Each structure stands twice: as structure tokens, then as C-alpha cells.
Image: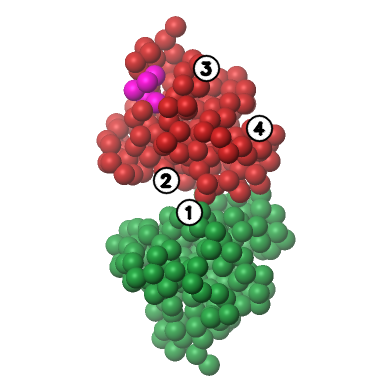
Chain colours: A green, B red
Amino acid sequence: MAKKIAVILPEMFEDSEYTEPAKAFATKGHEVINNGLIAGKTVKGKKEGTKVKIDKAVGEVTIDDFDGLLIPGGYSPDKLRVDDNAVQFSADFVKSNKPVFAICHAGQLPVTAQVLQGRKFTCYKSIIQNIKNAGAEFIGSEVVVDGNIVSSRHPSDLPAFIRESLKKL
Amino acid sequence: MAKKIAVILPEMFEDSEYTEPAKAFATKGHEVINNGLIAGKTVKGKKEGTKVKIDKAVGEVTIDDFDGLLIPGGYSPDKLRVDDNAVQFSADFVKSNKPVFAICHAGQLPVTAQVLQGRKFTCYKSIIQNIKNAGAEFIGSEVVVDGNIVSSRHPSDLPAFIRESLKKL
């Protein structure tokens, strides 16, 4: 059955961590909805300048509108974690049974939302200590699945990340 | 007496958080030495593209070579915290009696080095939860002085940050 996947995407996202999962989800018939901080804005990726038009501001939606959440890495999670609506949106997802797909720097958002206590999680090297300090169990694998959370370390892990994410849809 | 101030500066530092303190230190007769990840490389600021030639790699120096440390914010602290030499260098400074000047995202480096337990500290909004989770006491002031650590939140705090930093030299 086709699912609706929310992405939260401000400026400077890691291009491939958005484009590759989004393409894989669409290929399987799922719908990807691009949420951001400002509706109608076009945001750009950090390395390749991939342009994405934002459908809705994260403050205008709730997790009831979606079946899953993708948080790409790059510098975009740093911009999300200063936005109270984005922090709350990610918290609501992690606490629900709906799948959350988090790669690279994405973990910064649920750390800020204080919802990783006791969860198994992996991430980019720079935020490992933050993950541990948030009470999560860091695991240095290409992909970690813990209940509704699928996490990976960096773009090279995308095949494993996409494989395990698709199993949750 | 003239002091030697180390800066650690990879790509994408917040321009003004380097240029303004560096200028103020030099005006008072102090010497600023630009350390980075690769000696001889020219790095650029995030907003204004300020170019800075790196004198030495952080792995080639020790805190014995300097009287103080400046860590500008921007995205550069995220690049520093994946470098074991930079993490150790910042840890050695914080644990010494030599002053450490940290603004904006700079706190990410001592968080990774696990040396902020019990310290009073301030920072950019995005990393407040990381500072708290590291065992520090977050204070939402323009400048916080705790022993050898001087910290501020963002570029608007630069006058207070520079004023208190100069008192430590």
C-alpha cells in the first residue's frame, strides 16, 4: 500500500541523503512530501545544489498527515533544531509507532527533542558524543534498526539505509 | 605583556567571530596564530568568504606553545570535532588555567572532548541541549565567564565577548 513520507528539509541538506531515499520511496509507489521551515521556498543542497520546493511549513502539519519521516543529514538538521515546530514534529514521530529514517547529522534533531534515551542509534562521527550524552546507545554499524527508528552514519551507508527503511513501509 | 593566542579554524567558520576578536587581540599587542586541520591551506569563512592562511596543523602544536585559545563558531567546530588532535587540543586547554574563548557553535568541540561537566557555559540556540547533556550549566547571557572559559551566544554578543576575553589576557 502506498505510504506518505514526510521529509524535513531546510537549506544545506546533504543532497544524496535526500535524493536517493526519495527516489527509492517513489519507485515503490510511496509519496514524498517536502516539509521545511517556510512553505513555498526553494531550498538547496549543500554539495550539489539540488533544488527542492518546500510544500508545507513543518508548523502547518502533524504526524497524523503522514506514515513516516525522513531526516536527511548535512547542515540542515542544525537549522531544524532551532525551530520549535520541527523539534516537536520529530519528537512526536519518534514517540509514535511510525517509522523515522535518520542519517548522518539527522540525530541532532531527536537529541534536541530529548527522545533518544535508551534507543539504539548510529550517526556521523561528529555527533557520536551528543548521541551518547542524550542517553542513546551508539552502534557503529552501517544501519541500526531499533523499533521504529532506522539510522545510518553517512552517504556510503545509503544502500543499507534504504533497504531497511523500505522494510518499514 | 603580549600573549600568543591560538585559533583553530577549518573551513566555514563564522567570519566575524574570527575577524573581530583577532583584530581586538592584535590591537592590544597580542599575537594570533591560525591553526587548522592542514598546514599551509587557505580556509574560507561561511558568510563573507574571509580567507585565512593556516600557519600550523593542530596536530603539530601543543598548548605549551600558546597563552590562550579562540574557537570561532559557524560550521567549523563540526569539522574540528571529527579530528582527534583538535578534540585533544581543546581538552588540554579547558583543563589548564589558560583562557579559552568559545562563541556560538564552538561549544561542540569541548562537548566532544567531555570537559564541560559542571562548568557554566553559553552558546548558540541549536546546541543548548548538547551543552546541558554534557553536564554543563547553560546560562542564557551575552557572555559567561567561568574560571578560564569565556563563552558567548552569537555574533551580536561580540562586544561583550571581546571585552571579557581581553580581561583574561
Quadrant (top left, top right, bottom left, bottom right) of the N terminus of chain B: top left
Q: CA distance from mark 4 to mark 2?
A: 23 Å
In the shown orientation, is residue B70 left or right of residue A133?
A: left
- Residue ID for mark 1: A78
Q: Nearer the viewer, mark 1 or mark 2?
A: 1
Task: Identify residue for label 3.
Answer: B168
Tag 2: residue type? Tyr
Cα–Cα gap, marks 1 and 2 = 9 Å
Per the image, the residue denoted by label 2 is B75
- For the stretch drawn in magenta, the main secondary structure is helix
Q: CA distance from mark 1 to mark 3?
A: 31 Å
Q: Is residue B158 shown above or below A16? A: above
- Relative image position of residue A42 (x, y in whole percent): 32, 67
Query: In the image, are marks 3 and 4 on the same chain?
Result: yes
Q: Are marks 1 and 2 in contact (CB under 8 Å)?
A: yes
Task: Using the numbered discs, state the Cα–Cα distance from disc 1 to disc 4 in whole angstroms.
Answer: 23 Å
The residue sitting at 31% across, 44% down in the picture is B47
Image coordinates for residue B46, horizontal then vertical, percent: 33, 44
Q: Which residues are magenta?
A: B21-25
Report which residue position mark 4 lands on: B119
